[in-house]
Amino acid sequence: MLKSAGGGGEGGWVGSTLNQNLEKISDQAWLKIVTSKKVTESDRGKFIQAGQDRVITTSIPQFALSLTQITNRYPERFGRLALKFPHDVDPRYVSAILEGLRKIEPDEKMPKSEKPT
C-alpha cells in the first residue's frame, strides 16, 4: 500500500498532479514542465491522497504518462510541440508524444504511394 505525503496508510492508483487540468495546460506551460529541473525522476514517496482509491504525485514518469494521454486527444498540437523541445529534454517526454502519435491514421488526402502498408 502506498503512503501519502502525510505518512498515513492510504493509497491507490498512482497518477500525475497534472491529470486534473490536462485540457487547460498551454503549450508554453508544457515546455516549462518538460524542461523543469524541479520535476525529478522520483517523487521520493511524496504522494497526495486525491480520493479514496487514488494518489497523485509529481515525477517525470507520471508527467510523461500525462503527456501521452493529452497527445492521444490532440495529436497534431503535441506533434508540433515536440518540435520545440530542447535537445536535452528527458527522452521519456519525447517517447510519450511518440506513443500518443502512434495511433494516428494518415490523412485521407495523403497519396496512396506515401501511405504505410
Image: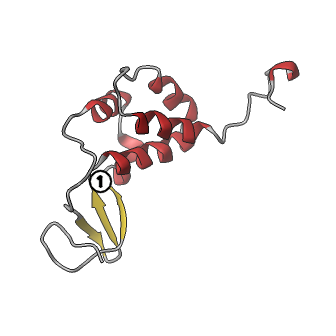
Task: Say which of 42 and 63 sits in front.
Answer: 42
Residue positioned 34% across, 33% down in the render: 30
Task: Say which of 78 and 39 sits in front.
Answer: 39
Q: Is residue 43 above or below residue 55?
A: above
Horizontal side, residue 69 vs residue 19: left or right? right
Residue 32 in which image quadrant: top left
Residue positioned 24% across, 33% down in the render: 36
Q: Amino acid at mark 1?
A: Thr
Q: Which residue is mark 1?
A: 17
Q: Among all residues in the image, which is located at the extreme left?
A: 6
Q: Position of residue 114 (x, y in %)?
A: 81, 20
Q: Is residue 108 above or below residue 44?
A: above
Horizontal side, residue 61 vs residue 41: left or right? right
Q: Among all residues in the image, which is located at the extreme right?
A: 112
Q: Position of residue 84 (x, y in %)?
A: 41, 20
Q: Is residue 116 above or below residue 9?
A: above
Horizontal side, residue 17 vs residue 111: left or right? left
Residue positioned 23% across, 63% down in the render: 47
Q: Position of residue 35 (x, y in %)?
A: 28, 30
Q: Position of residue 10 (x, y in %)?
A: 25, 78
